[in-house]
Amino acid sequence: MTALASEAQPHTTASDTARENARWLEIFAARLLGGLPSDVAARISAERRARLGAEALEFFSLRAEPIKVRVVITPQSEGGGGFAETVMEDCPFIIDSMLEYFHHLDIGTGLLVHPVLLAARDGAGRLVSLEGLRSIEHPESFVHLELRLDRGTHDAESIAAGLRNVLGQVRAATGDFEAMTARALEICEETAAQRELVEVRDLLRWLVGGGFVFLGYRRYRVAEAGGHRTLEVDPDSGLGLLRDFSRSRYARPVDLKALEPDHQKMLFEGPALIMGKTHTMSQVHRRGLMDDVTIRRSGADGRVIGFDRFVGLFTSKAYSEEAQHIPVLSAKLREVIDAEHAAPGSHNYKELVTAFNSFPKEELFRAPVSELREQLHLILDHKDEATVRISAHYDPVRRNVVTLVVLPRETFSAEVRKQIQAALGRILNGELVYYYLAMGEAYRARMHFCYDAAPPSAAQLRAMETEVSQLARTWEDRLLEELTERFGERRGQALAQRWFGAFSPHYKASTAAARAAGDIERIESLLEGGQGFSVELARQGGGDKAAAAAPSSELRMFEVGQSLRLSDVMPMLSNFGIVVISEEAAELRIDSAGAAVRAFVQSFRVQDARGVALERSGGAALVAEALAAVRSGRTEDGPLNALVLDAGLRWREVALLRAYVAAAFQMRLGPALPALRRVLLANPKLARMLVEMFRLRMDPAGPASAAARYAELRAAYLESLGAIDNIADDRLARALLGMIEATVRTDYFREPSAPYITLKFESAPEPGDQS
């Protein structure tokens, strides 16, 4: 590494500089990985730690700009992958904004390290002090994030430019956060004499108190110019993301007569508080259209003189707090109750309050009371009907179509929601802005959809009602259809009658009918065959964005009679090199020949050790059978099972290698069993070659060309040993090959196969033995 400290301390000797650099490297390396979970840190080799620490410090040591970014992408020909690194002054939202950015690019992420270090720099940005507890030091954020670039093509420069833009917005928003909250409180002081703005002031204080992530502020002025009233930006007012006003449509005065009538009406009529969604996506904290809070300001004569505008994101506190306790919304609720003549404490009053509280906050802030009353009636007037109700309202100011769908609770599922969402978007030819689900009113489910779309025609409204009604069939209706298609009318009806009562509400809400029919088929097969366990592997689907960002597979385990314990399953999966991301379990109870039967379905969302779907491994098609073999006791549960995925070996082939490893240890050809296993696990290609060479030598039904193929494979095996840089591992790999060649008899190929594997070896002759 270059002498980092020499510029800062010109009178120190070279040895002093070297000692200072070594101290910095020691500090940096310790802080770099110090915050990782112990199991993650344990998987990072000492060599990789040293390399990562040295390279990261070299990158950190010079920051000539406010935000330093580098993105490195390894070509697919060299294994793919890459990483992103950043250095900037520490502030909130760095990590979540970066993760959201890569999620938006459909790039998976892996190892993340994010130390915050106290550092001081000279005028050129060179590091002069690190964690020295000096007053000139300030907290700086360093991020190293590994990238999974297994899909598509990526350009490092464009990724880095986009990331620099995101972090620039983070810096702008967080740097002006205190100024924006102060401005909100100043507005409360400035309007203290205006009684009609009491609710607005209370709302601003609530936003400052944790209900809002302030990302930008700007003030607009209404002025008189040449007999015309104009609207323009106050150029000195901008904060955060709205500091640069050059691209604003009001950067230069705009004649109010040039505004669209709906826009004029929103700005100059109605409530002084104007709230809604912007058409700009937030790149800070979380991705989503930003929330817009605008306050109309009037002079002493009542004429509009300007507007104060905040943009940002409502916080989790805002979404979790009941609407009746939030300023402005509590006033809307009072208006609704008064208009409905609902006496406090009455049944009608309680229903209105409960339904109002369950509305999405975006809708409560946006919609006028008349629209809210119409939607509340749609929900409460038909709560006992087993019919589908739908309404649509067009917001001309925000150019959104807000659709409310109410349907019987038993017809709702995740699959139905996705189908309805897609159908409405297609009919409206619009893009989804947000979606909200409520399950609170009696036996009804309610979904709010907001689309960026043109006002719907009468024909579109009719099409929406027809298609939603078709989609909102019960889960049982769809299951019966799937069973009939798989098993025929008679068998399907019988299975439906037997299984309809077996599923819990959670299972039905989270599992598609087609998947449930597959589960029934699996369990019925176990019952008919007198078996107790089976496994199924399927690619994680559904178009879910999180699944797309981190490709995964679904592993489903079926057990009759007794459920697998997680404490047993997790080590077993770990031995196969399978990483579990999430797990769900369901218990199904059915009647079988007059006896109650319990069946269990465990669904695991999984990846391999590289963080990708199992299907990308060579042995994906073999893993289900291998897991079943371990569960049934036909083979051992041990680390070598990872060769099923890594080397594409069947479980019995892995058992064969396990036998050779055990024999090698008994013959003292290896120092320990873990060392022998390590050679195979680190070199799965060699493991596969050993199995194939065994087959070529010992299979009585082998091809006529077995000898020639064996010689070719043996040469390739020996050549591959050149890639092993550890002499001990090289020796062990040669020893395993020698054992294959010393094998003279086996029962491995006997049919039916025995529950054990027998190997007979030819011993080396004793010195002087002429027999």
Image: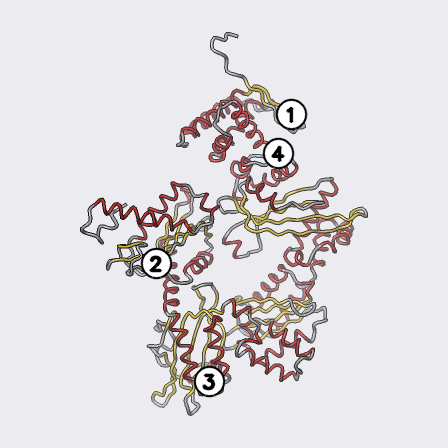
Q: Please tell me whether mark 4 sits on a helix, a strand or a loop.
A: loop
The residue lying toward the viewer, choosing from 442 and 250, is 442
Disc 4: which residue = 635
**Tag in front: 2 or 3:** 2
Disc 2: which residue = 140
Q: Please tell me whether mark 2 sits on a helix, a strand or a loop.
A: strand
Q: Earlier in the sequence, mark 1 or mark 3?
A: 3
Amino acid at pointer 4 = Thr
Q: What residue is drawn where x is 38% and y is 61%?
A: 167
In the figure, 323 relative to 728: above or below?
Answer: below
Quadrant position of the N terminus in the picture: top left
Callouts 2 and 3 close, C-beta under 8 Å: no
Residue 126: numbered disc: none
On screen, residue 395 versus residue 174, left or right, reads right
Disc 3: which residue = 268
Amino acid at pointer 1 = Arg
**Tag in front: 2 or 1:** 2
- Percent across and percent down for residue 406 are 65, 69
Disc 1: which residue = 750
Q: Please tell me whether mark 1 sits on a helix, a strand or a loop.
A: loop
Q: What residue is drawn where x is 22% and y is 50%?
A: 6
Q: Earlier in the sequence, mark 1 or mark 4?
A: 4
Q: Residues within 10 Å of mark 3 (few under 14, many from 20)?
A: few
On screen, residue 620 versus residue 67, left or right, reads right
Quadrant in the picture for residue 80: top left
Q: Count all numbered tags in the image, as a single digit.
A: 4
On screen, residue 254 versus residue 603, left or right, reads left
- List the single residue furthest toward the right: 594
**Tag in front: 1 or 4:** 4
Q: What residue is drawn where x is 44% and y is 26%?
A: 731
Q: What residue is drawn where x is 23% and y is 46%?
A: 16
**Tag in front: 4 or 3:** 4
